[in-house]
Image (cartoon, rainbow, N blue to C red):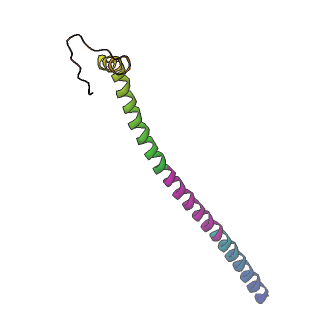
C-alpha cells in the first residue's frame, strides 16, 4: 500500500508542476504582450506630444495674426498694397 500512495503522491506533484509551468508560460506571454503594447503607447504618446506642441505653436501664431488683423497697421498695409492709397504727406519714388 505504500508504493501505491507514493505513486499517487508523485502523480499529484507532477500534475501540480505541469499546471504551475503552464501558468508560468501563460503569464510570461501576457507580460511580453503588455510590454509591447506599452512600447507602442509610449511611441504614440511621444508622437502626440510633438503634435500638441506644433498645434500650440500654430495657435500662438494664429492669435498673433488675429491681433495684427485687428490693428491699424493691417488696415494701412492692405490699403497700400491692394488699393495703392497713401497719406497726403507721403512721397512715392518709382523706378523707371
**Residue 30 versus residue 12: which sits nearer the camera?**
30
Q: Which residues are magenta?
A: 25-44
Q: Residue at x 64, y 71 (%)?
A: 25
Q: Quadrant of residue 18?
A: bottom right
State whether the magenta stretch is mostly helix, strand or loop: helix
**Residue 6 versus residue 11: which sits nearer the camera?**
11
Looking at the rendered image, the quarter that the C terminus falls into is top left
**Residue 80 versus residue 22: which sits nearer the camera?**
80
79 displayed left or right of 48: left
Q: Is residue 87 above or below residue 45?
A: above
Q: Residue at x 29, y 19 (%)?
A: 73
Q: Position of residue 82 (x, y in %)?
A: 38, 20
Q: Position of residue 76 (x, y in %)?
A: 31, 17
Q: Residue at x 58, y 65 (%)?
A: 32
| The furthest residue to the front | 96
Q: Position of residue 88 (x, y in %)?
A: 23, 10
Looking at the rendered image, the quarter that the N terminus falls into is bottom right
Q: Is residue 27 magenta?
A: yes
Q: Quadrant of residue 68?
A: top left
Q: Is residue 89 above or below residue 45?
A: above
| The furthest residue to the bottom | 3
Q: Position of residue 61 (x, y in %)?
A: 37, 32
Q: Is residue 9 above or below residue 28?
A: below
Amino acid at each position: 500500500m505504500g508504493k501505491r500512495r507514493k505513486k499517487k503522491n508523485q502523480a499529484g506533484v507532477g500534475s501540480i508542476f505541469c499546471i504551475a509551468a503552464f501558468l508560468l508560460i501563460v503569464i510570461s506571454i501576457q507580460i511580453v504582450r503588455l510590454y509591447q503594447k506599452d512600447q507602442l503607447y509610449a511611441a504614440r504618446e511621444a508622437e502626440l506630444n510633438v503634435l500638441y506642441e506644433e498645434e500650440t505653436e500654430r495657435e500662438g501664431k494664429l492669435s498673433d495674426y488675429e491681433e495684427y488683423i485687428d490693428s491699424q497697421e493691417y488696415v494701412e498695409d492692405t490699403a497700400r498694397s491692394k488699393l495703392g492709397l497713401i497719406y497726403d504727406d507721403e512721397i512715392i519714388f518709382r523706378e523707371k
